[in-house]
Image (tube, rainbow, N blue to C red):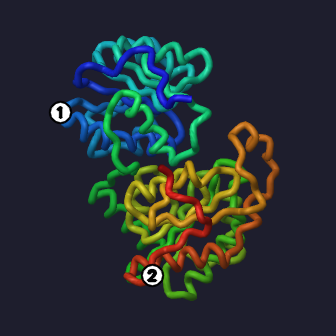
Amino acid sequence: MPIVDSRLPLPDRHPERILLIQLRRLGDVILAAGILEDLRRAFPKSELDVLTSPLSAQLLRNHPLIDELLVYDRAHPLREVARIRARRYDWIIDGQGSPTTARLSWLSGAPVRAGWGVRVWRAMYTHVVPRTGLPNVYVVRERQRFLEALGVPIGEPRTQLAVTADEKSVAARALADAGVRGDRARVALVLSVSEPIREWPAERFAELALAVQRSGAAPLVLENPGDEHRLSRFREVAPSVPVVRVFDLRLLMATIALCDVVVSGDTGPAHVATALGIPRVTLYGPTDPVQWNPHLPTTAIVVDPGVPVMGARERRQHVQHPGLLGISVDEVLESLRSLLAARDGATAPVSRFPFPIAQ
């Protein structure tokens, strides 16, 4: 199957205005925005805009490559269509491929519209990329297939976000108020995930935190909304470990930016860490590290061998799943030590699972 199923030839002129659409899921928004660097390199004078949800717009605030950040108002879809048409985009790149975004792309009036070849709404695009039948690759690399469809040269797939000095100052005060020491390596633990089958037990996070304390580093928990039950179980084992409440997304980002390593399941904060240049240890079960990890020296992978990779629909059938019980504290601690050693100029970190670099 060819990578590109184009019903029109490659664009014959450089676009003056480009809109990237990705409305939902924080991790997906970070990864979809990874193609902005390639677009900016190819078209340094073009306007690069992004359309996303109100929550994701917080995530992308101050992004150095975005000219205009548009917030989608789902309560007024016709008004949104009129607004997009008025901006007269040359190119629309729909990274999401939902009925909503496909219709918006089609109604935009843009002469070039790239999107996924999914179901009936593939007809709404001028340049179509298959969603299935191609090798699994890192999601940013997957999104770069849109650029290949449009004849845009691509570079190394990577992501970026930005936080301000003032935001870091607020985060530093929150860390100090929680009792997190600033003279030791800070190891942030994220207990929450969106699905039970992706969750590592809070008790094991607590055991990890105690081991980190004994090693001389400074563990801390980043408390997200909905963490109450997990945090209660964590505190039964490790009551002295500091907890920083990060219910505000910008505070979460700034706090991660001040840490040395983030340990979490495959969830949004892991992608935030990579986009901010912070090393991470990520625990995988039903989600595929080939797709969801950039395989950098600073991104260690720990996989539960007892949980097979499965799609979103299949994962939703496991609402009572006990989680990633096949991952031990020692495995995570080993990867964490490797990252901290690399930070201090010792040995390079080693992945806990020998996946190849995605090409």
- What residue is drawn where x is 34% and y is 42%? 154
Is the residue marked by circle 1 packed among few (<14), some (14-19), or many (20+) residues within 10 Å?
few
**Label 2 close to label 1 by CB (< 8 Å):** no
Earlier-in-chain disc, 2 versus 1? 1
Where residue 201 sits: x, y (%)?
72, 65
Query: Could you say which quadrant of the image residue 13 lies in?
Result: top left
Query: Could you say which quadrant of the image residue 93 lies in?
Result: top left
Front one among 118 and 337 = 118
Query: Could you say which quadrant of the image residue 20 lies in?
Result: top left
The Cα atoms of the two marked residues, 2 and 1, are separated by 42 Å
Front one among 321 and 310 = 310
Where residue 284 sits: x, y (%)?
64, 58
Label 2 secondary element: loop
- Residue that carries the numbered disc 2 in the rendered image: 347
Front one among 304 and 126 = 126
Question: In the displayed structure, does residue 324 sit left or right of residue 189?
Answer: right
The residue mark sitting in front, 2 or 1, is 2
Q: Is residue 111 above or below residue 307?
A: above
- What residue is drawn where x is 41% and y is 17%? 80
Q: Which mark is residue 45?
A: 1
Q: At label 1, which amino acid type do we have?
A: Lys
Where residue 180 sits: x, y (%)?
46, 76
Q: Extreme front residue here?
A: 1
Q: Is residue 226 above or below residue 181?
A: above
- What residue is drawn where x is 63% and y is 51%? 288
Question: In the displayed structure, does residue 2 sit left or right of residue 83?
Answer: right
Question: In the displayed structure, does residue 202 sit left or right of residue 18?
Answer: right
Label 1 secondary element: loop
Q: Is residue 3 above or below residue 234?
A: above
